Image (cartoon, helix red, strand yellow):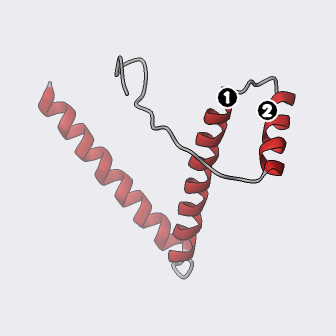
Amino acid sequence: MTTNAASQPETTRLTITWSKEADFALRSFLGAQGMRKGDISKFIEEAVRWRIFNQTVREAREAFADVPPDDLQKTIDEAVEEVRARRYRERAERS
């Protein structure tokens, strides 16, 4: 639920089930870092984001493992150039 979309992102309540050992380990870790009970959600969200990012990077590396580095860099450079050009055109059209 959002009260002010500009200042507070929309959130979802989640119920998880995990071992008491993992719960104790996380709470001990957060406590040692000076964090409080309310910081568990922030910690879990950050951990999920990192896991998704790492998985995406791993999949990309596997997908392009057989592409020569120079060809891959050329493809990346072309894609970046195309996106930047499109973005600059959109900005110019709005002005």
- Between 4 and 18, which is closer to the camera in this rendering? 18
- Asked if disc 1 and disc 2 are in contact, CB closer than 8 Å, the reply is yes
Residue beneath disc 1? 39
Residue beneath disc 2? 30
Q: Report the residue at 31% width, 45% height from top.
A: 84
Element under disc 2: helix
| Quarter of the image where one finds residue 31 | top right
Q: Is residue 8 left or right of residue 41?
A: left
Q: Report the residue at 57% width, 78% height from top.
A: 65
How many labels were placed on the picture? 2
Q: Amino acid at mark 1?
A: Asp
Q: Report the residue at 54% width, 82% height from top.
A: 66
In the displayed structure, would residue 85 be above or below residue 33? below
The percent coordinates of residue 87 (x first, y second) are 26, 41
Determine the CA span between mark 1 and mark 2: 8 Å
Instruction: Name the mark on residue 2.
Output: none
Q: Quadrant of the C terminus?
A: top left
| Quarter of the image where one finds residue 28 | top right
